[in-house]
Image (tube, coloured by chain):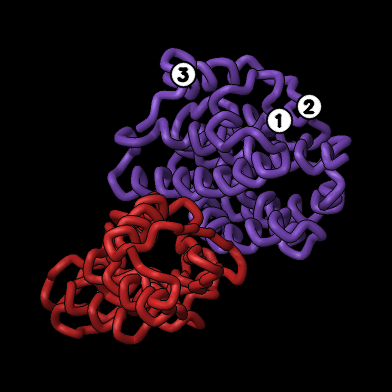
Amino acid sequence: MNSQLINYTLHLADTTLILSQRNSEWCGHGPVLEQDIAITNISLDLLGQSRNFYQYAAQLIGDTDENKLAYLRKEREFKNLLLVEQANGDWGQTILRQYLFSQFQYLLFEQLQNGNDEQLAAIAAKSIKETAYHVRWSSEWVIRLGDGTEESRSRMINAVDELWRYTGEMFLPAEYETLVDVSLLEKKWLDKVKEIFNEATLTVPENTFMQSGGKEGRHTEQLGFILTELQYMQRTYPGAEW
Amino acid sequence: MVSDTEISKKNIWQILETVVDPEVPVLTITDLGIVRDVRISGSEVEIVITPTYTGCPAMDMIAMNIRLALLENGYQNIKITSVLSPVWTTDWMSEDGKRKLKEYGIAPPNPRQQVCNNDLFAAAEAVQCPHCNSYHTHRISEFGSTACKALYQCDDCKEPFDYFKCH
């Protein structure tokens, strides 16, 4: 009956959880203290968003809770975007992943906050202020690094090559994705990215093969490794509490 | 045990005024403006709260502390509900709360209209030093010790300080 809404909410929850988990790997390893704190704060924001989505999904499903949904579902059940599960790589790759995603998420939440589902609208309206910070912070870094030294520039070019193929999926609506028509966001997103890339002296790739499948549970090899680490404790000691 | 007749909203609000934010212990949850409503039906007391930042880890602890404070005062049938809408902003913080923050050494949030600027590489907001009141300060980091704070330093008295960001 409302399986579309459940799947869509899980897709939003999984995407934010996995990106949060990825960013949290930088905790204590950031290039300088301030940026270490920045990326882990973004990680915390995303975790907060994912908790709100999971709590809502749990309420829709009934007889489950946010922890079970995050810790006890299998790889094929996760509906996150492929982009967010990609490895951190170097700082440049992490920054670019954050920028490409946050720029998309901002446009998505703009629509979702006026959408037909009251709770998803409330979560989007709550989160978009934080996403605005993420967009600003990550785009400044894309520009600094792209238009930086020879070294930072070559790393950003590699990051674009590595990640671009995972961006197409964001605008391919899944069967359950009916609340916001993501295909309509693509042009706006691309215009923004071109603006930032232009400042960063980076080139937007054209006619790239686009990988997809994450929204339907078909993932790259990366996700299994993340879930192993994320879910280890609950699977080894079921029901363990903090 | 409190009888039904003794249950009064006024009394409950007074109890809530004693519950502090675990990360900024000079602020009570009523100073922060996160208590949206107190509802009483029969013997049940429902406290409606709203989170500050989406990922704020203090929220779970605040909910627990509300429960404990009410239990200590004899209330047993307690329900805590979290609502997201309307969205909390730093405008909900009381003037008293802002004064207490400053006395504690944390610069209180500026009025909101100053932050609605998402331009890249924009100059950091002018924030007044809570120690010497100088506006001659600079931002060290946009993200500070908690999600709700940025790190600044005063160029006059040289003291570093936290700034409770507008949100």
Quarter of the image where the N terminus of chain A is located: top right
Q: Which of marks 3 and 2 is in front?
A: 3
Q: Residue at x 25, y 75 (%)?
A: B101
Q: Position of residue A135 (x, y in %)?
A: 57, 55
Q: Position of residue B9 (x, y in %)?
A: 43, 78
Do dots 1 and 2 share one subunit?
yes
Q: Where is residue B116 in the image (x, y as percent from the top left)?
A: 54, 75
Q: Earlier in the sequence, mark 1 or mark 2?
A: 1
Q: Do the residues labelled 1 and 3 touch (CB within 8 Å)?
A: no
Q: Name the residue under label 3.
A: A238
Q: Which amino acid does label 3 sit on?
A: Pro
Under tag 1, what secondary structure?
loop
Judged left or right of residue A130, residue A240 is left
What colour has chain A?
A: purple
Whether residue A176 is visible, yes or no, is yes
Callout 1: few (<14), some (14-19), or many (20+) C-alpha neighbours within 10 Å? many
Q: Taking B134 as reference, is A232 above or below it? A: above
Q: Which amino acid does label 2 sit on?
A: Glu
Q: Taking B13 as reference, is A165 above or below it? A: above
Q: How far apart are marks 1 and 3 (CA)?
A: 23 Å
What colour has chain B?
A: red
Q: Which residue is drawn at 13% across and 70% down?
A: B158
Under tag 2, what secondary structure?
helix
Q: Mark 2 points at which residue?
A: A216
Callout 2: few (<14), some (14-19), or many (20+) C-alpha neighbours within 10 Å? some
Quadrant location of residue A113?
bottom right
Residue A4: image tag: none
Q: Are marks 1 and 2 in contact (CB under 8 Å)?
A: yes
Q: Which of marks 3 and 2 is nearer the N terminus?
A: 2
